[in-house]
Amino acid sequence: QVQLVESGGGLVQPGGSLRLSCAASGSIFSVNIMGWYRQAPGKQRELVAVITSGGSTNYDDSVKGRFTISRDAAKNTGYLQMNSLKPEDTAVYYCYAIISSVPGSPNTYWGQGTQVTVSS
């Protein structure tokens, strides 16, 4: 079994920063992709950022230049550094990862979600 545990959400003023963490544990052979989605009330879940095992990254246009995704492969942990936060960034953020417990058999796992609220 594989688990993803998120941390780092909270309340921050506009212009502030937060860092989310997503730690994978359990039976892990390889972590192929890690990333974050977010879902605001009344809206569909949207992809925020993703990072591959090779370090390639991709971001939604709305967060480019403000958010940075990274990972510590030794710790099987991903990070989402969020700077210059705006009220429209308010959402529940869900980390996800595509992990193989055995070679050639990837599965998608989700974190429990963490609330990010940007408000003065």
Image (spheres, rainbow, N blue to C red):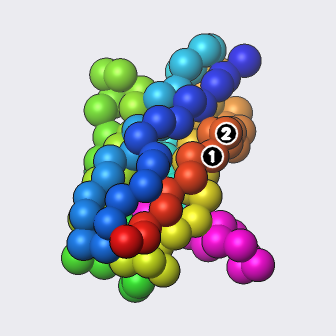
Above or below, comparing residue 118 to residue 36 in the picture: below
Residue matched to label 2: 112
Above or below, comparing residue 19 to residue 45 in the picture: above
Above or below, comparing residue 106 to residue 84 in the picture: above
53 sits to left or right of 2:
left
Above or below, comparing residue 13 to residue 53 in the picture: below
User: How busy is the neighbourhood of tag 2: few (under 14 within 10 Å), some, or many (20 plus)?
Assistant: some
Residue that extends furthest to the right in the rendered view of this protein: 42
Residue 39 on the magenta segment: yes
What's the residue type where badge 2 is placed? Gln
Tally the marks: 2
Image coords of residue 83 (percent x, y): 25, 65
In the foreground, 66 or 55: 66
- Quadrant in which residue 82 is drawn: bottom left
In which quadrant of the rendered image does the C terminus lie?
A: bottom left
Residue matched to label 1: 113
5 sits to left or right of 120:
right
Circle 1 SS class: loop
Answer yes or no: is residue 23 visible.
yes
Answer yes or no: is residue 53 visible.
no
Residue found at x 32% / y 48%: 19
Image coords of residue 62 (percent x, y): 41, 83
Which stretch did the figure color magenta? 38-49
In which quadrant of the rendered image does the N terminus lie?
A: top right
What's the residue type where badge 1 is placed? Gly
Labelled disc at residue 78: none
Residue that extends furthest to the front in the rendered view of this protein: 120
- Quadrant in which residue 42 is drawn: bottom right
In the foreground, 29 or 114: 114
As measured in the structure, the alpha-carbon distance from the residue carrying label 2 to the one carrying label 1 is 4 Å
Find out whether the residues at labels 2 and 1 contact each other: C-beta distance under 8 Å.
yes
